[in-house]
Every structure is written in structure tokens, then in C-alpha cells.
Image (spheres, grey):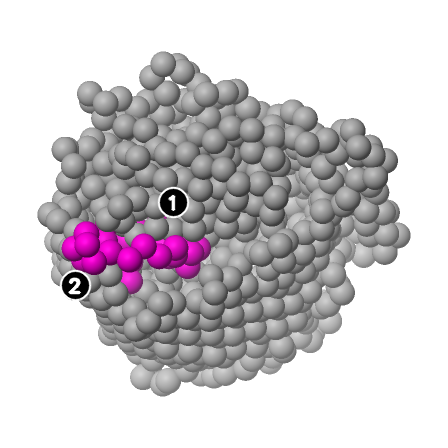
């Protein structure tokens, strides 16, 4: 607690220096949303509480407003024949120009019938072919929301229908689905798990490789996706990287408990408007460990580093070319063999049934080359080449009970590499009809090797030993018809073809949106979505009694999901939004065990999930629920977001018993908000504009279901044994957590500085994670999630 008091005093300290009237440039590009052609002569109006000005866009759609006072501003963009939009609460600071790119939607009615209205664009997704269960998010939100830790996945945990899988990792559960079903797409490329210490077959990890200093506003989808998204049944992060500043060189330095960062951006050639953007981070968790904060890893200290970059080369003649990349490397050692046995072993959120030495070495990376070209005034194309890889090498040595010498217990070496090509064309026929058609081809190469020592037979059993490849081909087509400015229909079809077993699936998609009155919209959507069986499941070996192996799961089919959603959206005065959605998801062809059991792949990703041997696609499941959102967009420094999700998530294994899934929590409630205070200066010629920011979050959710432990069987085996006949029949206690973020900003003449502390689990509540058998006490033991966790961060942009 003394450390917390010191941190709060540090944040609350206000410099005696005061502020002058500092100014900055606001600029960007205005294009037609469907054709991507530049919009010339669009009007841009800029206002704040005591300043207003404006400009018009030039022949390339570019606009620039100079000498804008620092602070919060609003932009209103309009052009004859287009729907105008208003973008409020943009923050202008020194040290970094504000770049706001605009996509205008052409009105679907005749020019003389157009009535220009200013629409708040916050509630609309960037992808115009998305109808429902989607929202755009700003990078400022991932920096501002308490407990988000500058991580877009943790930020998304605040949205309706989403909850955390656990405190230890940033995996998210969407509408009761396993986190395995989440798709990450970056710059149009489907990327592997973008997290440090993350398994290539999962979607989360303790620390994100994605760096929000290089990201731009992006979309997050939770169901009934458009046809361009395939091989997913849970949700989609459609992430965009921003371009570097093409006029001036800018820098960011950031240091916190999670890493030291250096970032730079600027022009490669001002004449051609080409630019670069790069950011590098190196871990500093040893600082947090030195302060006595429990990292959940005992005495072990995770080490990692990552890099993000983007090079952009625009050209009127040949189109726009971009080269982007993302990569990370991490390692950690957790060595019980070096622990002083006279000391009490530290409790960790992840515990083994035996003492062990764990070695983790991981790396992942993606690089992509994109080319986009605008054809006349009605169409554009995009072609993407990419390569990605992810490697997990994990070794576990169990310690001998006689002399505590390490003995190899298990070894995993998974290498996944993917080469992909993606192309699409977007054609705007007129102001009512738009067609997008595309295809992607992914060549995936796998090297999977893992084995485990079985004490009962005293042999090493090979689980996987596979070198091979497969190709996924996904053509799709999407069509949008706008009857008028209030009513539109989106139709589409996606197809997935898997070459390794000649499987294919055709997936229809449909959506409808009807604006009943200004600010009142009804939407509905349907989609058939499918996902392939994870490669490590399909290539699992089963050892027979004679010691030989078979691979019985290579021909497993897609798991399919029918997703139905109906929603209502109302915006009050452009500042407060109410949104509700009702959904039903019916899941078929689920991978279950061939012999009668409670096993289902829908539970994969939970901590207590275990693999089965011979599998088939005969399982089923369903999710249904209602989601409510009330959101006040930031106005005069104040915002709040409240979400309530009520849902059920059930499944049937091969034993045909209806059970809760491991991710069924029944309800999730979030309430978060914040206030930005501008500190008035007493001196006329002050050096800084000062702001104090406070953000808080309240999270209350039902506990996840788990399988009871067979205590007597566990005593005999010496390790945890679950009663699978009652799988997922018990529920953890209620989950409750409060997060708090305090920040101080100093806006100077040429730089902006921020000092913040982000405290997770302010009350140090013990939230249950899972239950295990403790062979030392012969009784059951509850393992808890992370307790009080502060994170200090300092950032300077210049």
C-alpha cells in the first residue's frame, strides 16, 4: 500500500510551470468510402470551445489546417451529394501532428433530394459491408481504458458480449465461444497469435506483440461477419496500421513496467509523400518483480522484445505500395530445481501437479507487401503477399523425488509457417450498388513434434510427429444495395477449400440495416461460419497396446456455426448511444471423442481442457443471449461505457448429455468511465498546458464452469483426476474486479509528456481461477487469479 501511495503522489504532482498558447497541425485525406477516389473540394470545419476555422480538400483529397490550439477539437466534413460526418473529441497535442483520414459515403438519393446531416461516426464500423455485431475502436481507447494496459484485446473485454478468459492472458471469450475461434487480421493478412508466450494454436498470451503506437482505428466484430472473413466462428479483430507522417519526423519514447519503447516516423521523400513508421520494445518486467509485485511466474522473469514497422509509397501512376511487419521474441525459465527447499514455495496462478523446471522459447513474425490501385472514379483493387511464422519450443523437466534431479517430462517443438496471397476488387456501380469480390490462398507448412513421459508405463509417448503442409483457398463475393439513405441490404458468400483432406464448405451471409428515424436503427444479420480443425488435433498420434501408432483424426471436417443476430441502435444528440442485440448461435459438426464421453473441442482453451484420442465431427452446441450497451462519447472531458451481457453456452459431447461449456459465465457487467481535467494556469507565459486524467472500471461476472475433481482417484494417481461424468457442472464464485488509471499530461511547445499508473485489481480481491488436487496435503486447492497489479508508464512524443 505504501508503494501505491507513492505512485499516486507522483502522478498527482503538478509542475509549478504554466502554459502558453501552443498550436499544432491537423491534416488528412478525404476519399469516397466505396471507390476510394479522392474527394476534391470537400469542406472541413474545425471547432473547439473558443476557436473555429476551416479549409477544403485539394485534387488529391488532402487537407491541412495549421496553427490549431492544443486541446480537444471536433471536425465536420461535408460535400455536395455525400453524407456529412462529425468527428468529435479529437485530441490535439504538441510533438505529433494529428492525422485524420476521412471516408465519405455518397448519398443514395438524387442530388436535389439530399439533406445534409452530421452523423457521429463513432458508432459505425470502418468496413461498410458490416451490418451488425461490429464496432470501430480508437487507439486512444486502448490507451485510456483502465486495465487495458495499451492492449487492444484487454480493451475489447469492456465491450458487450466479451469477457476475459483469465487475468493471466488476454484471451477473450465472445458470446460463450472458445477463444480459439478468434481471428486476428492485420492490414488484410490473417496473422498467427500476436502475443508473447502465446501458443500458435491459441489466440492469447500475457503480453501483446501488437503495439498501439503503430495502429490506427480498427474494427472489432463479434458475429454474423461479412463474407470476406472466413475460418472463424467467434470474432474478428480487423486491425489497421497507420502510415507515418509524410511531412515531418516525429518520435515517441515510452517506458513502463512492461517495456521500454522507441518509436520514429517521418517522410522518406516529401516529394512523393512516402513515409516510414517503426517501433521497438524491450521488456522491463524485472523492475516490477523487484518491487515485489507478483507476476504470476514465481521467481521467474519473462523476457521479450518486439518490433512493428510500415513503409508507405503512394503513387498516382502505379498505385499505393506498402511494406509492413510485426515480430516478437520471448523466453522464460521457471526452475524449481534452483529453489531453496527450506523456503515455502511461492503460490502461482499456474501450478503443476509436481515440481518442475520449465523452459519456454517462442518467436513469431509477419511481413506483408500490399499494392492498391484506383481505377477511374468507381473501383479499386488490393493485392497482398505475406509470410508469417510462429515457433513454440517448450521443455518441462520433472524433479526426481529422491534427489530433485531434473528428468525430461515433456518436450514440444511446434513450427508453423504460412505464405499467403490475397486479392480483391471493390466496384461501385453507382450510389446504390457496390460489389466486392476476392480470393485468398494460404500455403501452410507445419513441423510439429511433442512427446510426454508416462510414469505408469515408464515410456515416452509421442503425441505428434508431423512434417507437412496444406493449402486453404477462400474465394468470396459481397454485394451491397442501398435503397435509399435509410435502408440497405448486404449479401455475400464465402467458400473455404482445404486441400489436405479435400474438404470444402459454402457459407452464405446476409445483413439488413434500416434507419427508422434519425439516430434510430434496426439491424439483423445471418451467417454460416466455419473453422478448420486445429492442425495439432488433426495430426495427433494414438499409441496402441502393441506400441505402434495410428493417426485417426486427419479427415476431420469443419466445425460450423449458424449465427443469427437482431439489434437496435439509438443515438441521443450525438453524444449518448444505446445499443441492444439478441443473438442465437447453433454450432454443428463439433469435434468430440468417438467413444462416449464429455469431451468437446468447444471447451478448448480452458485451463483444465485435456486432449482425447480418436475423434469425430458429431458434437453440437449453442449460444444465445442479449447484450445491452449504454455509451456516452467523450464530451467536455467526460465519458462512460456500461455493458451488460446475459447468455447461455451449452454443448453435447458424444455421450449426448447437455452441459455447460467451460466458457459459460451466464452474465457479465462492465461499468467504466473517466474524466479529463484541464488545470488552469495562473501565469500568463506558462511552459505547459496541464491535464489530469482519471479512469476507472468495475467488472462483475459469473464464475466459469468446471469439472469436479474425483478426490479418491486423485489420491491414488497422485495428480488431479476429474470426474468427467459430471463435466462442467460446478461453477466458480462470482468474479469481481476494480481497475483504476491516473494520468498527468504536460503539453509543451514541442513535446507532450504523460505519466500514468494503471492499477489492476485495486482491492486485491482473490478471484478463483481453477481447483486442483494438492498431493502434499491430500486435499483440494483453489488457485487464484492475479491480485493487486500496478503498472507505471511514462511517454513523451516530440
* Number of numbered callouts drawn: 2
Prevalent SS, magenta region: loop
Residue 384 vs residue 287, the one in the foreground? 384
Give the magenta-colored segment's residue range.
106-131
Horizontal and vertical percent position of residue 80: 26, 46
Task: Tell me if 591 is positioned left or right of 260 in this view.
Answer: left
Residue 735 vs residue 593, the one in the foreground? 735
**In terms of secondary structure, where does tag 2 sit?**
loop
- The structure residue drawn at horizontal position 74% and vertical position 61%, both measured from the top left corner, is 762
* Quadrant holding the C terminus: top right
Give the labeled residue for mark 1: 77
Q: Earlier in the sequence, mark 2 or mark 1?
A: 1
- Label at residue 680: none
Horizontal and vertical percent position of residue 141: 54, 51
Q: Is the residue marked by circle 2 packed among few (<14), some (14-19), or many (20+) residues within 10 Å? A: some
Magenta stretch: includes residue 549: no
Task: Tell me if 269 is positioned left or right of 207 in this view.
Answer: left
Magenta stretch: includes residue 108: yes
- Badge 2 vs badge 1, beta-carbon distance below 8 Å: no
In the rendered image, which quarter is residue 108 located in?
A: bottom left
Task: Tell me if 502 is positioned left or right of 618 in this view.
Answer: left
Q: Is the residue marked by circle 1 packed among few (<14), some (14-19), or many (20+) residues within 10 Å? A: many
Give the labeled residue for mark 2: 483
Q: Is residue 23 above or below residue 438?
A: above
Q: Is residue 514 above or below residue 118?
A: below
Horizontal and vertical percent position of residue 653: 34, 77
Residue 405 vs residue 719, the one in the foreground? 719
**In terms of secondary structure, where does tag 1 sit?**
strand
Is residue 110 at least partly visible in the picture?
yes
Please tell me whether mark 2 or mark 1 is closer to you in this view. 1
Amino acid at each position: 500500500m505504501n508503494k501505491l501511495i507513492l505512485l499516486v503522489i507522483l502522478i498527482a504532482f503538478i509542475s509549478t510551470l504554466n502554459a502558453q498558447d501552443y498550436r499544432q497541425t491537423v491534416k488528412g485525406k478525404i476519399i469516397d468510402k466505396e471507390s476510394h477516389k479522392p474527394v476534391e473540394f470537400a469542406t472541413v470545419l474545425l471547432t473547439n470551445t473558443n476557436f473555429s476555422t476551416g479549409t477544403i480538400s485539394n485534387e488529391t483529397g488532402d487537407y491541412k489546417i495549421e496553427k490549431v490550439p492544443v486541446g480537444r477539437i471536433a471536425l465536420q466534413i461535408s460535400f455536395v451529394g455525400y453524407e456529412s460526418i462529425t468527428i468529435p473529441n479529437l485530441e490535439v497535442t504538441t510533438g505529433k501532428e494529428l492525422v485524420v483520414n476521412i471516408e465519405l459515403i455518397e448519398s443514395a438519393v438524387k442530388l436535389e433530394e439530399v439533406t445534409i446531416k452530421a452523423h457521429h461516426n463513432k458508432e459505425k464500423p470502418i468496413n461498410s459491408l458490416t451490418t451488425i455485431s461490429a464496432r470501430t475502436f480508437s487507439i486512444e481507447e486502448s490507451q485510456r481504458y483502465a486495465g487495458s494496459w495499451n492492449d487492444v484485446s484487454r480493451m475489447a473485454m469492456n465491450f458487450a458480449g466479451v469477457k476475459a478468459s483469465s487475468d493471466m492472458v488476454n484471451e477473450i471469450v465472445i458470446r460463450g465461444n472458445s477463444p480459439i475461434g478468434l481471428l486476428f487480421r492485420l492490414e488484410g493478412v490473417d496473422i498467427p497469435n500476436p502475443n508473447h508466450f502465446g501458443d500458435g494454436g491459441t489466440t492469447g498470451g500475457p503480453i501483446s506483440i501488437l503495439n498501439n503506437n503503430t495502429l490506427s482505428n480498427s474494427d472489432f466484430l463479434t458475429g454474423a461477419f461479412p463474407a470476406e472473413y472466413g475460418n472463424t466462428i467467434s470474432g474478428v479483430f480487423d486491425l489497421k496500421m497507420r502510415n507515418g507522417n509524410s511531412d515531418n519526423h516525429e518520435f515517441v519514447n515510452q517506458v513502463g513496467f512492461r517495456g521500454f519503447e522507441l518509436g520514429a516516423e517521418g517522410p522518406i521523400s516529401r516529394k512523393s509523400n512516402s513515409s516510414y513508421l517503426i517501433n521497438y520494445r524491450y521488456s522491463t518486467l524485472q523492475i516490477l518483480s523487484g518491487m515485489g509485485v507478483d507476476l504470476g511466474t514465481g521467481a521467474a522473469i519473462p523476457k521479450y522484445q518486439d518490433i512493428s514497422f510500415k513503409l508507405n509509397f503512394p503513387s498516382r501512376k502505379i498505385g499505393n505500395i506498402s511494406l509492413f511487419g510485426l515480430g516478437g521474441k520471448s523466453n522464460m525459465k521457471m526452475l524449481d530445481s534452483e529453489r531453496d527447499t527450506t523456503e515455502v514455495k511461492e503460490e502461482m496462478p499456474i501450478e503443476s501437479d509436481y515440481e518442475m523446471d520449465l523452459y519456454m522459447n517462442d518467436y513469431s513474425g509477419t511481413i506483408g507487401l500490399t499494392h492498391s490501385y484506383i481505377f477511374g472514379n468507381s473501383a479499386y483493387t488490393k493485392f497482398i503477399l505475406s509470410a508469417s511464422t510462429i515457433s513454440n519450443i517448450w521443455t518441462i523437466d520433472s524433479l526426481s523425488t529422491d534427489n530433485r534431479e531434473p528428468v525430461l517430462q515433456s518436450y514440444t517443438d511446434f513450427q508453423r509457417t504460412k505464405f499467403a496471397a490475397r486479392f480483391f476488387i471493390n466496384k461501385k456501380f453507382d450510389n446504390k450498388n457496390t460489389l466486392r469480390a476476392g480470393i485468398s490462398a494460404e500455403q501452410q507448412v507445419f513441423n510439429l513434434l511433442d512427446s510426454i513421459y508416462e510414469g505408469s508405463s515408464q515410456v515416452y509417448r509421442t503425441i505428434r510427429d508431423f512434417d507437412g503442409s496444406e493449402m486453404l483457398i477462400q474465394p468470396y463475393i459481397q454485394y451491397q444495395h442501398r435503397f435509399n439513405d435509410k435502408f440497405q441490404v448486404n449479401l455475400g458468400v464465402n467458400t473455404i477449400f482445404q486441400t489436405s483432406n479435400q474438404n470444402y464448405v459454402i457459407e452464405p451471409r446476409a445483413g439488413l440495416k434500416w434507419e427508422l428515424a434519425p439516430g434510430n436503427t434496426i439491424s439483423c444479420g445471418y451467417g454460416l461460419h466455419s473453422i478448420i480443425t486445429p492442425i495439432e488435433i488433426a495430426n495427433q498420434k494414438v499409441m496402441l497396446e502393441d506400441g505402434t501408432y495410428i493417426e485417426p483424426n486427419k479427415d476431420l471436417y469443419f466445425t460450423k456455426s449458424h449465427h443469427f443476430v437482431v439489434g437496435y441502435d439509438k443515438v441521443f444528440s450525438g453524444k449518448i448511444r444505446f445499443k441492444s442485440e439478441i443473438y442465437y448461435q447453433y454450432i454443428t459438426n463439433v469435434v468430440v471423442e468417438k467413444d462416449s464421453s464429455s469431451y468437446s473441442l468447444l471447451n478448448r482453451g480452458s485451463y483444465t481442457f485435456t486432449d482425447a484420442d480418436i475423434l469425430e465431427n458429431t458434437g453440437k452446441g449453442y449460444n444465445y443471449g442479449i447484450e445491452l450497451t449504454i455509451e456516452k462519447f467523450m464530451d467536455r472531458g467526460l465519458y462512460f461505457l456500461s455493458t451488460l451481457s446475459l447468455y447461455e453456452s451449452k454443448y453435447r459431447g458424444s455421450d449426448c448429455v447437455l452441459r455447460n461449456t467451460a466458457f459459460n459465465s451466464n452474465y457479465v457487467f462492465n461499468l467504466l468511465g473517466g474524466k479529463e481535467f484541464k488545470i488552469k494556469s495562473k501565469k500568463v507565459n506558462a511552459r505547459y498546458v496541464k491535464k489530469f486524467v482519471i479512469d476507472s472500471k468495475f467488472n462483475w461476472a459469473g464464475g466459469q464452469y468446471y469439472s469436479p475433481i474425483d478426490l479418491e482417484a486423485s489420491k491414488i494417481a497422485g495428480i488431479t483426476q476429474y470426474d468427467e461424468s459430471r463435466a462442467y457442472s460446478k461453477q466458480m464464485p462470482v468474479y469481481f474486479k476494480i481497475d483504476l488509471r491516473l494520468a498527468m499530461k504536460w503539453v509543451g511547445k514541442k513535446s507532450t509528456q504523460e505519466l500514468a499508473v494503471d492499477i489492476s485489481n485495486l482491492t486485491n480481491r482473490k478471484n478463483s481461477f481453477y481447483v486442483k488436487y494438492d498431493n502434499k496435503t491430500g486435499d483440494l486447492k483453489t488457485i487464484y487469479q492475479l491480485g493487486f497489479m500496478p503498472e507505471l508508464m511514462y511517454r513523451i512524443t516530440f
